[in-house]
């Protein structure tokens, strides 16, 4: 499954203190059981001193093969442990799909 592969790769790359990978395909106009739209929340000390764009590039780099072949959309939320604490351990909800679905 793609979701498990994403989790495995992000764990290996970032040694996160918190990781949440959600398959949000059901929110889009795709066949039931699809694994094409994901949201990831990664909290890692490795993001200390990194700008947001750099963090996202690193996540995209780790998942480059999946983004080229399987994933249609990827929402990325990256935090340092301190930032995560300031956010009350909460990442924003994904917006409703403008292209249909639920």
Image (cartoon, rainbow, N blue to C red):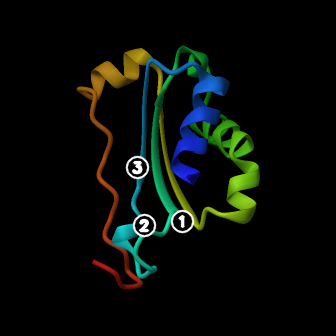
Q: Tell me the element at label 1.
A: loop
Mark 3 and mark 2 residues within 8 Å of each other at the beta carbon = no
Tell me if 49 is positioned left or right of 69 in this view.
left
Residue 63 in picture, x, y percent from top left: 68, 46
Q: From what the image shows, is residue 55 above or below residue 16?
A: below
Residue drawn at 34 percent across, 70 percent down: 27
Residue drawn at 47 percent across, 21 percent down: 80
Task: Measure the alpha-carbon separation of dots 1 and 2.
Answer: 6 Å
| Residue for badge 1 | 36
Say which of 25 and 94 sits in front.
Answer: 25
| Residue for badge 3 | 22
Mark 3 and mark 1 residues within 8 Å of each other at the beta carbon = no
Quarter of the figure with the C terminus: bottom left
Residue 74 in picture, x, y percent from top left: 54, 56
Q: Tell me the element at label 3.
A: strand
Task: Measure the alpha-carbon separation of dots 3 and 1.
Answer: 11 Å
Tell me if 61 is positioned left or right of 8 in this view.
right
Residue drawn at 61 percent across, 62 percent down: 71
Residue drawn at 64 percent across, 35 percent down: 9
Residue farthest to the bottom? 100
Sort mark 1 into few (<14), some (14-19) or many (20+) by Cα contacts within 10 Å.
many
| Residue for badge 2 | 25
- Disc tally is 3
The quadrant holding residue 54 is top right
Mark 1 and mark 2 residues within 8 Å of each other at the beta carbon = yes
Tell me if 29 is positioned left or right of 69 in this view.
left
Q: Tell me the element at label 2.
A: helix
Residue 48 in picture, x, y percent from top left: 57, 16
Residue 57 in picture, x, y percent from top left: 69, 42
The quadrant holding residue 90 is top left
Q: From what the image shows, is residue 16 above or below residue 33?
A: above
Q: Which of marks 1 and 2 is nearer the N terminus?
A: 2
């Amino acid at each position: 499954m793609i979701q498990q592969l994403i989790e495995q790769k992000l764990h290996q790359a970032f040694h996160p203190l918190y990781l949440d990978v959600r398959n949000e395909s059901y929110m889009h106009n795709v066949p039931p059981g699809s694994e094409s739209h994901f949201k990831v929340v990664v909290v890692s000390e490795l993001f200390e001193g990194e700008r947001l764009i750099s963090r996202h590039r690193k996540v995209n780099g780790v998942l480059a093969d999946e983004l080229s072949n399987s994933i249609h959309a990827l929402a990325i939320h990256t935090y340092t442990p301190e930032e995560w604490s300031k956010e009350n351990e909460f990442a924003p909800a994904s917006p409703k799909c403008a292209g249909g679905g639920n």
